[in-house]
Amino acid sequence: MSMRNKIKQFIESRGLTVYQFRQQTGIANKTAYDLVNKPEQYPAREVMNKICSTYRIQPGEILEWVEE
């Protein structure tokens, strides 16, 4: 069992660039690009809180469980 993030799909579905995503959430540049380009990377709790509160979403909208 494994988890992966769906942040790339999430920002694309909203028509956002990575730059807009990081500006809106206030997360670090490297963190934003890593989350978008590395689905195996999980957001830290603080980052997850920033994303969820900015977009008013639940964590399940940007994380998914995948069977190995």
Image (cartoon, grey):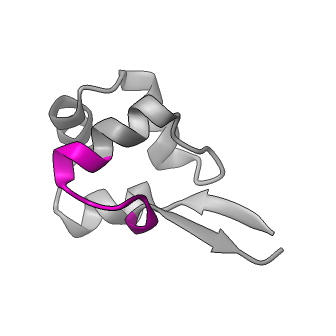
Count the marks: 0
Q: Position of residue 35 (x, y in %)?
A: 49, 42
What segment is highlighted magenta in the picture?
A: 52-61
Residue 64's place in the image compared with 44, above or below, is below
Q: Position of residue 58 (x, y in %)?
A: 34, 61
**Quick check: is 55 in the magenta stretch?**
yes
**Residue, x 65% and y 71% (percent of image)?**
65
Q: Is residue 37 left or right of residue 62?
A: right
Nearest the viewer among 59 and 67 is 59
Nearest the viewer among 2 and 31 is 2
**Residue, x 41% and y 55% (percent of image)?**
7
Residue 14's place in the image compared with 22, above or below, is below
Q: Is residue 19 left or right of residue 31?
A: left
- Magenta stretch, main secondary structure class: helix
Among the 4 quarters of the image, the one containing residue 46: top left
**Residue, x 36% and y 21% (percent of image)?**
28
- In the rendered image, the quadrant that contains the C terminus is bottom right
- In the rendered image, the quadrant that contains the N terminus is bottom right
**Residue, x 30% and y 36% (percent of image)?**
50
**Quick check: is 62 in the magenta stretch?**
no
Q: Position of residue 17 (x, y in %)?
A: 22, 47
Among the 4 quarters of the image, the one containing residue 33: top left
Residue 49's place in the image compared with 6, above or below, is above
Q: Position of residue 24 (x, y in %)?
A: 16, 36
Residue 24's place in the image compared with 61, above or below, is above
